[in-house]
Image (cartoon, helix red, strand yellow):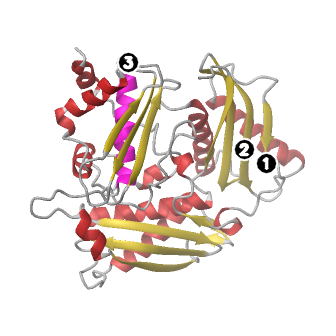
Amino acid sequence: MRSDYLFTSESVSEGHPDKVSDQISDAIVDLFLSKDPEARVACETLTTTQRVVLAGEIRGQGIMDKDGNWAQGVEQEIEETVRNTVREIGYEQDGFHWKTLTFENHLHGQSAHIAQGVDASGNKDEGAGDQGIMFGYACDETPDSMPAPIDYSHKILEQMAADRKDGTAPFLEPDAKSQVTLRYKDGKPVACTAVVVSTQHAEGYDNGEKEAELKAYVKSVVGGVLPDGFLSGDTAWHINPTGSFVIGGPDGDAGLTGRKIIVDTYGGAAPHGGGAFSGKDPTKVDRSAAYITRYLAKNIVAAGLATRCTIQLAYAIGVSEPLSLYVDTHGTGSHDDADLEKAIGSIEKLGGLTPRAIRTHLGLNKPIYRVSAAYGHFGRTPDGDCFPWERTDLIDDLKAAFA
């Protein structure tokens, strides 16, 4: 492997049109799971100028009956959830306003052919909600066990959103993107060579003193996020490089659920199986298996068994047991990778790696997903029931496997 190189990752804010769609889809997942922890949800969202459209399939007690009829009041709750999500993000613009946008709901009942493969019956355990491959990753580059470029890109935009909402930076609007390029030496990040931040802004902040104020603000945020010494006179800055950015969000570009899967994961520093997370209940292994592989990889790194770890799982629709488990510590492990695979299989409290075992161990059948739909699903701080896949509670079990 190369040890000296440049690597870049990007993030997008909660007001980016694709992230608006992700947050709406996950707010719907949370709504339905709050009514039925076993609800099945596959909700896709389209956002565009003054319009939000939902489509997909659902099933659940107190949500929709077997004939496809909505339970009383649920349709109104869905619309209220959508509008409240847009309001909380901060959109009150002529081209996209939570109160006046047009809303369309095209959700319908789950396919019976999909249901028969996923549901448990007789001696058959609950099967995976789809086929596919899922990856998890962790490394020791940051305290969050995340690759540094994506970690810092997220934190820049998180701080800008907080400043926008509390009035510290009233000239900011919700849509924004960030990108951080880091120089690696001996495999470790040591300097920032380039920063790109494009942020939607109020009228007039694209020239003169107001533009200078905006750029100085962005530089101060970046300086507060990056480690001391990473920025220098050699760092290239690109702040709103196209000029004006007043028209943004779904008014500036259509948004769709699931188009920011690299932003959601590891910023390109690790493989991705291709499946999106948002809008899916946790029987969908695109979501739950990606969470358990991150959880396992993070615990391996936290246990000191490796400084980098990639894990892959594979599933077939309707089949409960994974088809394969693969561990790669990229030459940084203190034990053979095959032995780490065996160690994972020996941890009794995991209960295995079936979809049901994953959901049970991590407690995924809860309304915990809206908060994950912006600023990354990984590298977050466990908070109550949220982000259980970020816990490091397998350290002793993993170490015991090699005692």
Q: Is residue 86 magenta?
A: no
Disc 3 on helix, strand or loop? loop
Q: Which x, y percent locates residue 188?
A: 59, 20
Left or right, 385 with reference to 273: left
Q: In this picture, is 66 found above or below 185?
A: below
Query: Residue most toward the left?
Result: 122
Q: Amino acid at mark 2?
A: Val
Q: CA distance from mark 1 to mark 3?
A: 41 Å
Q: Which mark is residue 240?
A: 1
Q: In this picture, is 311 found above or below 288?
A: above
Is disc 1 in contact with disc 3, using a CB cutoff of under 8 Å?
Answer: no
Q: Amino acid at mark 3?
A: Gly
Query: Is residue 390 visible to us here?
Result: no
Identify the image quadrant of residue 80: bottom left
Mark 2 packing: few (<14 Cα in 10 Å), some, or many (20+)? many
Q: In this picture, is 87 found above or below 190?
A: below
Q: Amino acid at mark 1?
A: Asn
The residue pinned by badge 3 equals: 304
Mark 1 / mark 3, whichever is N-terminal: 1
Q: Which mark is residue 197?
A: 2
Identify the image quadrant of residue 37: bottom left
Magenta stretch, residue numbers: 285-302
